[in-house]
Amino acid sequence: MGIGSSGSDQKTAADAKPAPRVTVTETAKGEAEPAPTVTVTKTAKAKAAKATPKKTKDTTTATAADQVVFKVWGSAPAGTDITYGSDTDNLQGSGLPMTKTLKLTDDAMYFQVTAQLQGGGDIHCSVTVEGQTKKGHAAGGYNICSAQLSSDFFGGWN
């Protein structure tokens, strides 16, 4: 007894490869071929970006109810020295007109702005907290414009 088969089941190399089959597709005469597809791509021009106002480091995104607004305006040919803030935080301002906004802090006792003329001029200043505004005025050489709002015992500003 041998291992293997009797040889009648064996295939030759020629038998293992199937014969090639060719399929031909033709367009029927008289029928038009489909039109080619054309894709058009348009590039849209970018819209010009709107100029965003320059934010100062102390500007906040708070609402008007929780903001303190400091303003100084007028004429000061030789310049002004401006200080604004609260009883715990004094900041330096510059240039006319000047508008600065800070977040209202619950523990502040007062908010104020002062502007001293350096030489001659005529300036105004104001501080606004929760709809209350105090204003000041200075004219002449080295005079000081001052405005201050203080908190009261009932949570208001005067």
Image (cartoon, helix red, strand yellow):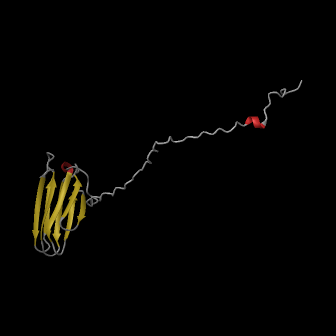
Q: Is residue 127 left or right of residue 34?
A: left
Spot occupied by residue 123 in the image (x, y as percentages of width and height)? 12, 68
Q: Is residue 76 left or right of residue 52?
A: left
Spot occupied by residue 12 in the image (x, y as percentages of width and height)? 79, 35
Seen from the viewer's position, the closer of residues 155 and 53 is 53
Q: Residue at point 75% right, 34% down?
A: 15
Q: Relative to residue 47, is residue 75 depicted above or below?
A: below
Q: Relative to residue 40, is residue 2 depicted above or below?
A: above
Rendering quarter of residue 16: top right
Which residue is at the far front?
30
Query: Quadrant where the N terminus lies?
Result: top right
Spot occupied by residue 107 in the image (x, y as percentages of width and height)? 22, 50
Seen from the viewer's position, the closer of residues 95 and 40 is 40
Rendering quarter of residue 87: bottom left
Q: Residue at point 84% right, 26% down?
A: 6
Q: Residue at point 19% right, 54% down?
A: 68
